[in-house]
Amino acid sequence: MKRFLTSVAAFGLMAGGAAADYQLTILHTNDFHDRFEPISKYDSTCGAEDNTEGKCFGGIARMITAIGEARGRAGDDVLLLDAGDQFQGSLFYSQYGGDLAAEFMAQLEYDAMAVGNHEFDDGPEGLADFLDKVGFPVLSANIDVSQNNRLADRVGKSAVLEVAGTQVGVVSVLAEDTPETSSPGDTVIFSSAVQAAQAEIDRLTGEGVNKIVLLTHVGLPADKRLAQELTGVDLIIGGHSHTLLSNTAERAEGPYPTVENDVPIFQAYAYGKYLGEISVTFDDAGAVTEISGEPILLDASVSEDAATVARMQELAKPLEELRSQVVAETSDMIEGSRDACRAGECPMGNLVADAMLDRVKDQGIQVAIQNGGGLRSSIDAGEVTMGEVLTVLPFQNTLSTFEVTGDVLVAALENGVSQIEDGAGRFPQVAGLTFAFDASAESGSRISDVMVGGAPVEMDKTYGVVSNNYVRNGGDGYAMFKTAANAYDFGPDLADVTAEYIAANAPYKPYTDGRITVK
């Protein structure tokens, strides 16, 4: 039995008694992105036949089984936490918004959730609709929502969870650049994650809570900075960077936990492919004395909950006609992974940028720029369905055309590579131009050898550009495009443009051609 008090209401909180050598199991998820159905090894749609053959991963039906089994192992002393970004990433979000996340998170009895940047993809109203349907605390210490009528007093800075008579504090923070990566609007005010987290940790500690979990949606590099700068944190459970930390998986980016400044940090990839499972032991003073665990891979060895499979079949009916429509064929897998498309030229980036430029080439447009973070999965070889295209491009972005001078174009490319070390979504996938970059150079001096149409860029010359409406309006740090001349943001849907381009070039052959080079 658990009870929670958010920071909005937890006045006069008395410290609970803590037994010596208290052992707690924490189950955690992050960046689920509406992958309610099983996914392929490319994080995209996985068909029923492949699922039957054991080739698929994840899906909410496996997650329900895995969490139930983990709870059985843990007994009463267990928490289930989510580090944000339940929203956005499949046709289910396009159809149902946050309703399915609310339904299944309530069924799974989550204890707390961090606000992720994509929880604002439909503005504060989208998050508010979700809050109407859940009873667990949804947290972020470094946002002030008091000026928004629907969110005011509804997003806590922290929660104190009572687990079998023992109090555990959960403090959460959100990436400070969320106004650039999503749509929180002017009524949601962001502050320093470090300062906000420390203030809340100090407040809880002063009230006698000596077990503090920092539940973040800032990404692993920022989690490491938090571990260096904060005091009083027992462990960090994060999201946002889609990082697999594991002691056994071949593609892990670090151990589980990754320890920074004596603070253990955990993250469990994304898309419901893994369930994080941590066993942590605290002494009487609240210090961590032992910690262990490993993410659970939700492959075919994890059975799917039958009732949930039936529910998903019901929910999928309105989507079937659209997503089963075969639009083209590809000769090989089109690589669109996060690791590839946020660090350099990638085949999916070339496809989408080429498609954009091809659509508007008769309008005097010379250059296409697509943010790598807008590409959400790969597509496997063979038939390409509209559902697969929409999984890659789920944001319902439209083509935007505009004009900027060469110096603005170069500034945009500098912005695009400015956070490459953090895996930021602003990395520019391009068509109609080529450039080189040196990631080791100072920010602002990384771009060189910019060529447009085979000729060196001219700083005072005006160029026609096509991008998506999110980037054109300043998303992912592209503020230099907000004042562009002759801007038109209401072109065709980017997913439709891409699908039609693949069809016109079927069987499409994925490629890279050196348009982006690394120095």
Image (cartoon, rainbow, N blue to C red):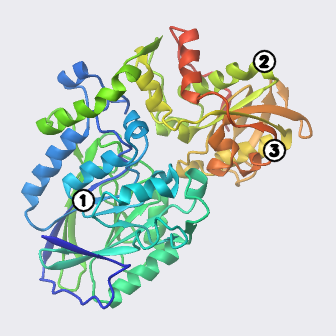
In the displayed structure, 231 sits above or below 177; it is below
Q: Please determine whether, in this image, residue 171 is positioned above or below residue 405.
A: below
Q: Amino acid at mark 1?
A: Tyr
Q: In the rendered image, which residue does mark 2 sit on? A: 362
Mark 1–mark 2 Cα distance, whole angstroms, equals 52 Å
Q: Which image quarter: residue 16?
A: bottom left
Quadrant housing residue 250: top left
For the C terminus, give its image quadrant: top right
Q: Is residue 305 left or right of residue 113?
A: left
- Label 2 – label 3 distance at C-alpha: 23 Å
Circle 1 sits on which residue? 110
Q: Amino acid at mark 2?
A: Asp
Q: Circle 1 — which element?
A: loop
Q: Quadrant location of the N terminus?
A: bottom left
**Mark 3 lies on residue:** 408
Residue at 36 percent of width and 74 percent of height: 158
Q: Residues within 10 Å of mark 3 (few under 14, many from 20)?
A: some
In depth, the one of 177 and 242 nearer the eye is 177
Give the label, 2 or 3, closer to the camera.
2
Q: Is residue 196 above or below residue 202?
A: above
Residue drawn at the location 50% of the way across and 69% of the way down: 145
- Crowd around label 2: few <14 · some 14–19 · many ≥20 (10 Å): few
Among numbered discs 1 and 3, the one appearing first in the sequence: 1
Please state the horizontal and vertical placement of residue 355, each as a whole percent of the image. 63, 22
